[in-house]
Amino acid sequence: MENKDWLKFYGKIPHSIQYPDGSLYAVLKKSIEEHKKDIAYDFLGKTATYEELGQQIDAYACTFYNLGLRSGDTMSIIMPTSPQGIIAFYAVNKLGAVASFIHPLSTETELEHYLTLSKSRFALTLDIFYEKIANIKDKVPMERLLVTKISECMPAVKKIGYSIITMKNRIRPDKSWALWLNTQDVFCDKPIEDTSVNKDTLAVVLYSGGTTGVPKGVMLTNGNIVSEGMQVAVWGNLNHSDIILAILPIFHGFGLSVCVNAALVAGARTILVPKFTVKDVAGLIKKKHPTFLIGVPTLYRALLNEKKFLTSDLSFLKAIFSGADTLPRSLKEEFDTVVKANHGNTMMLEGYGLTEAVTAIMAMPMDHYREGSIGVPFPDMDARIFDQGTTKEMPHGEIGEICLEGPAVMKGYMNNEAETNATLKVHDDGKTWLHTGDLGYRDADGFFYFKQRLKRMIKSSAMNVYPSEVENVICKHEDVKLACVIGVEDENQINRIKAFVELHDHGAASQEKEEEIIAFVRTQLIKWSCPREIEFMDKLPLTRIGKVDYRKLEELEHERK
């Protein structure tokens, strides 16, 4: 059956989209021209129209050009989700340069690695992160650091309040290599002409989660970013009346491409959230009425514990998508119940993606639900299931590696030919396929189902165990808030299954509760997939984007030996 046979269930999405052969900035410029007076972004209550965003980008581009940034150079953007980070991103692209996004909470060692790998001549960061960058300036190729304040783009009252609070922490950058960038003072009387680039020109470097020990630089072209943004816009039928809450950070593909770029490509509004707190996000939902909620499971779990969200009218929601981690069915059902009770007419749906393909490349159609499915590929993206380590396609219903082909697939890993060749492989059809390292299967109608990362699959008693499947069952227990499963070395089973569990009521942890949960899981899973032990934790560790950090738990277990 052809990969697009799911269209008989959902015929509103086109098979293909026409993509321009040019820069990302050129696509945004079209939105700026068509939506001049519409609001492009909202930051803590201060807004900018598309016309104003265009002027800000021009001004930044002038500044960067005058400092020496040229086509092919790299600027690292070490920023939270903020106007300065967004403006700099498009200004860098306008000049034909490359934007390398780095988590601002990265350690000095990590910063040194990222700045050196990307050969960044320039970088942009906040004043509060200046010192740790200054500490490594002699170890990296960076020539100039631009420093700004998060308060620069705040509304007047909040700006004054923030300035008072941070008065004691003011810094004095070394003027020989650091420069203050005040967004309000940057001016450009004659905009720099757009640099001519094509779709294959490198535009962005994002960093993978480091599953092999050292994070890899994922090289994404203008064509990659443009195509994925347009695909998301078409999939969600985004238009100028839509509002997306950008909770996920811009240094992650999900936040940068889906929550910001796709919105701006479509002429919609993006609400920039610099730092996640559940009270602030619940307040924004109540006040700003976003039409799209896009997040990770831990975000939605947190909202279910926030009174302000539970009492909000949700009739304005068009769609709710969860990605980046496995969505427990119990969480989906609980969230859907709250949405319906608060006058919402949508339900939570899953999507799937990875940084090596920008981010989301498939999702459930907005008016269709299929239990456990991560959906179907976006237009122009092909997804298939191949036998692990081969180019043999698996029959429907059988588990194999999820592989992707299409315009969103990365150019490769920066300065890492071996990893690139292991991930991007030319098959017999002559196409280059991205081997995701994720296991899953496809049903007869073309809907896909994620099982587990290959590297995370556990062998127990010679049988395959998929931690996400076990975690999903554990989370069905009414007392469980979060769960994470790992394999622990065992003489008899090679690996035995251990679960780390966070309860709604931490005080309920006991041996009796452990036995109760294990017995509950045994009623739903075959014996070798069931945990042999449970360790209760007050808080499970999370990654910087809010996923449960199973590697931390593996390290904890290893240290105890």
Image (cartoon, helix red, strand yellow):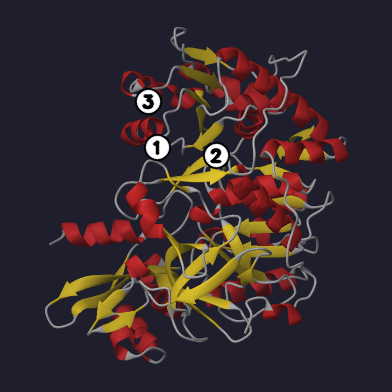
Count of numbered labels shown in the rendering = 3
**Residue type indicated by callout 1:** Ser
Q: Nearer the viewer, mark 2 or mark 3?
A: 2
Q: Are marks 2 and 3 in contact (CB under 8 Å)?
A: no
Q: How far apart, in angstroms, are the residues tagged by discs 3 and 1? A: 9 Å
Residue 246: tell me if it is visible. Answer: no
Mark in the foreground, 2 or 1: 2
Location of mark 2 (residue): 202
Is residue 158 left or right of 251 when viewed as pictured? right
* Residue 132 badge: 3
Label 1: state its secondary structure. Answer: loop
> Percent from the top left, x then y, of residue 419?
35, 53
How many neighbours does mark 1 have within 10 angstroms: few (below 14), some (14-19), or many (20 or more)?
Answer: some
Q: Which residue is mark 1?
A: 106
| Comes first in the chain, label 3 or label 1 | 1
Q: Amino acid at mark 3?
A: Lys
Numbered badge on residue 250: none
Rendered location of residue 170, percent (x, y):
49, 16
